[in-house]
Amino acid sequence: MRLELGNILIKDVQFGEKTKVDNGILFVNKEEIISLVREDDNFISVEVELARPGESIRITPVKDVIEPRVKVEGPGGIFPGFMSKVDTVGSGRTHVLKGAAVVTTGKVVGFQEGIIDMTGPGADYTPFSQLNNVVLVCEPKDGLKQHDHERALRMAGLKVAVYLGEAGRNVTPNEVNVYESLPLLKSIEKYPNLPKVAYVQMLQSQGLLHDTYVYGVDAKQTLSTLINPTDIMDGAIISGNCVSACDKNTTYHHLNNPIVHDLFEKHGKEINFVGMIITNENVYLADKERSSNWAANLAEYIGVDGVVISQEGFGNPDTDLIMNCVKIEKKGIKTVIVTDEYAGRDGASQSLADADPLADAVVTGGNANEVIELPPMDKIIGYTEPVNSIAGGFDGSLRENGSIVVELQAITGATNELGFNKLSAKGF
């Protein structure tokens, strides 16, 4: 599979009469976006706002962040199973509006949604403060059920990302990056002396608004399976999550998974990146056992020497993480786990809900319980009222002057377990 990602570098976003990219500026027609989203009668109103790096803007509660893209060559389309047919993606050429994003907000769907500050101390903790954001503020009709609200907001973000991505179809990219993965046997033949490494990505799939989709299929309805890493780089996995903002994998995270990018960077030099396994995070013990068994057996089947395992979420998924780690280690395969920590505000509590001596190589995205004060912003996109009740907030988080005191848990992407952040820790 050979995938070319043509990055069109976006340095600003502005409203305009026509949606287009001109000299690195993304111009957007607000009325066309509103009309597109209002095709869904679950929304009684839609507003479109712009938020650029460095502006005194707070966006909350954030549901998802999506990167605009367009498929220009090869099979499949953007976000297969939702916005295009289920043809396999991961090859051909895709143009990316790099530096732009669609952010969805409005009335809170679930209590685990987050904050993006475009400036100030909070901006240092979220990668999305560095993007030129087109923000959808969608108001649901009265009485809309939570799952229907989540689905409508998810589809609104995907629709607008595809709409904006079309503006890059005939634009010459600033750079083109090529990613290629060979069939397993050919890959082994090409790099016989390099250690064979795979990536095991755990997908949040606990239900109750904790969902991830693969080619349009809810991940909790799947077994652990092999997938080509270029598939996820090309939109095969999207977020349907309303989980703690700090470590949820937004759709933007899946499209730009840094573990996949880093493994490709080392491929053919230090390691042989032979493939990827996706597995779910279910609630019942039998489901956890089944999925971790399959993940371990697949890792053994493809004959790898080591794996990187990333999780999404905390608490209940910590059990899945350790199960995957221990079972793969017992196959004689070395593991590195990527997680974050809920170690209490003083950092003195147990970091994970589960542990094992075999989990002795760990990368952490930081302590989500650390407390931060966010100063007032000049403009609010969305609503600040939910801040007192979202995960990481508490009664009194929102102060009269507009400042907010919360745990990092409330900041979108702050302790991301793909390493898409700035926090970590060092053991001694």
Image: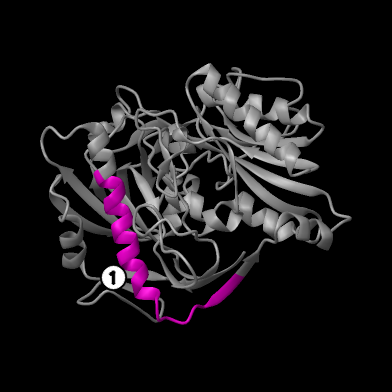
Q: Quadrant of the N terminus?
A: bottom right
Q: Nearer the viewer, residue 138 or 255?
A: 255
The quarter of the image holding the C terminus is top right
**Residue located at (51% from left, 22% from top):** 316
Q: Total number of numbered labels?
A: 1
The amino acid at mark 1 is: Gln
Q: Is residue 154 magenta?
A: yes
Is 251 on the left-hand or right-hand side of 44?
A: right
**Magenta stretch: dominant SS?**
helix
| For residue 73, above or below residue 136 | below
Find disc 1 in the rendering and name its residue. 14
Q: Residue at x 50, y 31 (%)?
A: 313
Which of these two is toward me, 24 or 372?
A: 24
Magenta range is: 152-177
Q: What residue is shown at x 49% (from left), y 50% (from top)?
A: 253
Looking at the image, residue 358 sits to the left or right of residue 211; the answer is right
Q: In the rendered view, would you say 342 is above or below 298?
A: above
Residue 148, image x, y percentages: 23, 38
